Image (spheres, rainbow, N blue to C red):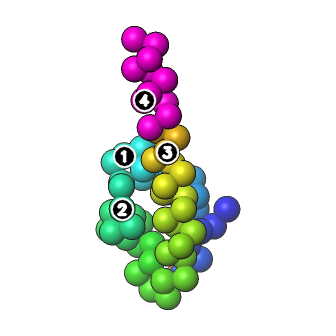
């Protein structure tokens, strides 16, 4: 789904950016342009980023427990 209409950025792209190391909205703005025009996407982009980073943390914990 599109998160940022101004820059045609999808939730998939935000998850990819998170996997690439994006941790903040500022990181997303720099990489994808999110929130750099009207700013209406900020809340949804932040939620997507948090969810993406949370999934990575769960995976990391699961991997550490398995090791
Ligand atoms: S919807 Fe993202 S800057 Fe406008």
47 on left or right of 25: right
For residue 3, the mark is none
C-alpha separation, residue under disc 2 versus residue under disc 3: 13 Å
17 to 28, vertically: above or below: above
Task: Report the front residue among 3 and 7.
Answer: 3
C-alpha separation, residue under disc 1 versus residue under disc 2: 12 Å
Kindly identify which residue carries mark 1.
20
Answer yes or no: is residue 43 visible. yes
| Place of residue 48 in the rendered image (x, y in percent of width and height, measured from the top left) | 55, 58
In which quadrant is the N terminus drawn?
Answer: bottom right
66 to 24, vertically: above or below: above
Which numbered disc, 4 or 1, marks the residue that appears first in the sequence?
1
Kindly identify which residue carries mark 3.
54
Label 3: element kind: helix
For residue 24, the mark is 2
Label 2: element kind: loop
Label 4: element kind: helix
Kindly identify which residue carries mark 4.
60
Q: Which residues are magenta?
A: 57-67
Which label sits in the foreground, 2 or 3?
3
């Amino acid at each position: 789904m599109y998160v940022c209409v101004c820059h045609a950025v999808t939730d998939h792209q935000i998850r990819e950016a998170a996997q690439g190391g994006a941790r903040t909205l500022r990181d997303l703005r720099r990489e994808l342009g999110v929130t750099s025009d009207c700013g209406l996407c900020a809340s949804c982009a932040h939620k997507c980023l948090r969810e993406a980073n949370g999934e990575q943390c769960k995976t990391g914990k699961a991997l550490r427990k398995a090791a």
